[in-house]
Amino acid sequence: MPDRNSAAHRAMAAAVARMPDPVSYQETALLETDLVAAFGTCRAVAVSSGTAAITTALAACGIGEGHEVLLPAVTVVMTVAAVAACGARPVFVDSAADGRGMDLNDLAAKTGPATRAVVAVHLAGRTDGIHDLAAYTRATGLRLIEDACQAQGTTSGGRQAGTIGDMGCFSLKDGKLLACGEGGYLLTDNTDLAARAAAYRTHWQSDAPDAPAGTHLGVNFRLAEPLAALARHHLTRFPEALAQRREQAAALHRAVDGTPGLEPITAAAGEEPNGYAALWRLTLPDPRAFAARLAQAGVPNSTGTHRLTAAHLHPACSRFASGDLPHARVTVDALLAVPFTEHDTDEAIHRRALTIRREAVRWTR
């Protein structure tokens, strides 16, 4: 390998710098422009998945080996995997006693010299506690990354989910309100972080502040052009998709609320959820078993169908666990989150409501 100061090395670096950014493909670039216009941020960076978006955001923030990242124990394993992929250690934070967001006292107690970022996870389109987290990270100098993969279109305090922290991460996987089969994107008002994210997703073949092309290792997290074109098409009807999802959630709540053993989880003050899922807190005996029974009866839900488990209790995350987090465990086990897709008809929602009410009555007999 040539010396960094040699003519050969300088020539190689210059050649790398002249290489076109493969992510400046037309459809991807246009999608990023459209996302900026739709969500009101300075920059958007398209990537290959929602998990890739979180990994890219962490890498753009310089997070890696020897660092710790705080995240809620009430999360999906994909968020944990993204932190681990960067070489950082995930540190799980307990839920608040009411199940809304992270326990700020536990968050503060687990913030240490190695802590570099907090990841807020907006499960089922809810952003509980995001403004308190933003205030905490501003005061402590930590980065705040939002996992908003399930929160496209949710607003809190007049702000779009994913635009409150330093970077917001989204998924374009089927089932999301904005989808193209597979893919993801980041939103940010920090142009330096956007440049680093764009460089990282394509083997660092483009320049970033203090990191010219070819000076760092990156990955291939590029979004395929046909998928970018499909996402652009679906973005044009995003307002209609958002309205549909909100009405679906509202319709299921109207039909189910009042059923003994199911307490509706209402939106926080100032929040307008996107309707990703209808949400209840189960007060029935053995709520996880009840959720599994609903799944068997044709009602998809987070714990019964997808086996959502508090992260510190998940087998794949056991090496990161450090003690019990009782509020997180109870929050997950008592959660009934019933998601929707654009293909769910009024009749299908009506059948789900009948099933939920019937099974709840049977469960308590």
Image (tube, rainbow, N blue to C red):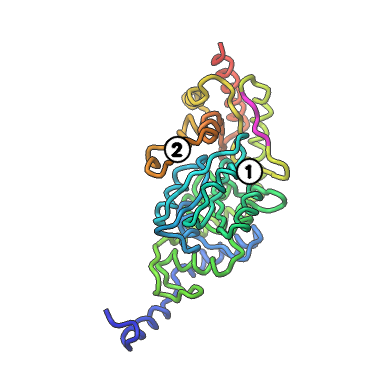
**Residue 265 colored magenta?**
yes
Cα distance between the residues tagged 1 and 2? 24 Å
Highlighted magenta segment, given as a residue range = 262-266
Q: Nearer the viewer, residue 178 or 343?
A: 178
Q: Residue at x 45, y 49 (%)?
A: 90
**Which numbered circle lies on residue 323?**
2
**Which numbered circle lies on residue 128?**
1
Count of numbered marks: 2
User: Which comes sooner in the sequence, label 1 or label 2?
Assistant: 1
Q: Is residue 81 above or below residue 327?
A: below
Q: Nearer the viewer, residue 245 or 133?
A: 133
Where does the C terminus fall, quadrant-wise? top right
**Residue 145 colored magenta?**
no
Q: Is residue 205 visible?
A: yes
Q: Residue at x 47, y 67 (%)?
A: 23
Q: What residue type is disc 1 on?
A: Asp
**Residue 310's spot in the image, x, y percent?**
48, 37
- Left/right placement of residue 41 relative to residue 17 reads right
- Left/right placement of residue 351 relative to residue 199 reads right
Q: What residue type is disc 2 on?
A: Gly
